[in-house]
Amino acid sequence: MTYQVIYDGNCNLCVTLVQVLENLDKGQIFSYIPMQDEQTLQKWNVTSTDCELGMILIDADAPQKRWQGSDAAEEIGRLLPAGKVFVDAYRALPGLKWAGDRFYEQIRDNRYTIFGKRDSTYKSDYCSDGNCKF
């Protein structure tokens, strides 16, 4: 099973987190598409308006299965080795999921102010189509 991670390739925080995930996964489960790659996003029926709500995770084998924002981050964590235990505990603690969702929204809406913006879009070596240029 493989998943497409759609992230902001101009956001310093987003790119750093993608790079951490790349090092953990080595392209085994996840492929990456920057939100700026509109041509590839069209293949997955994702619009720039969709991207405004945060990162998107798509099950490549069943593209109708999608997660967005903090739900996408949680699902990515759940898919990592031993991650399910931590995500399940996080989801089970009263109020923590709600607080996490609000925290994600604040970071999403202020990411460039807090973490800065890259001069060029980051494109992962583990891209969705094997052709990592756009």
Image: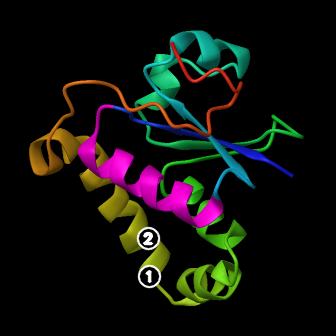
Which residue position holds label 2?
98
Apparent side of residue 102 relative to residue 25 in the rendered image (left or right): left
Identified by mark 2, the residue type is: Trp
At 52% from the left and 13% from the top, the residue drawn is 38
At 60% from the left and 79% from the top, the residue drawn is 87
Q: Which residues are magenta?
A: 10-25
- Look at the numbered disc 2 and give the secondary structure of its residue: helix
What secondary structure characterizes most of the magenta part? helix
The x and y percentages for residue 123 are 46, 31
Identified by mark 1, the residue type is: Gly
The x and y percentages for residue 2 are 80, 48
Residue 95 is marked as: 1
In this rendering, the answer to whether 83 lies above or below 134 is: below
Q: Nearer the viewer, residue 8 or 66?
A: 8
Apparent side of residue 45 relative to residue 15 in the rendered image (left or right): right
Q: CA distance from mark 1 to mark 2?
A: 5 Å
Pointer 1 with pointer 2, Cβ within 8 A: yes
Q: Residues within 10 Å of mark 1 (few under 14, many from 20)?
A: few
- Look at the numbered disc 1 and give the secondary structure of its residue: loop
Say whether residue 19 is magenta.
yes
Q: Nearer the viewer, residue 99 or 4?
A: 4
Apparent side of residue 114 relative to residue 29 in the rendered image (left or right): left
At 43% from the left and 20% from the top, the residue drawn is 36
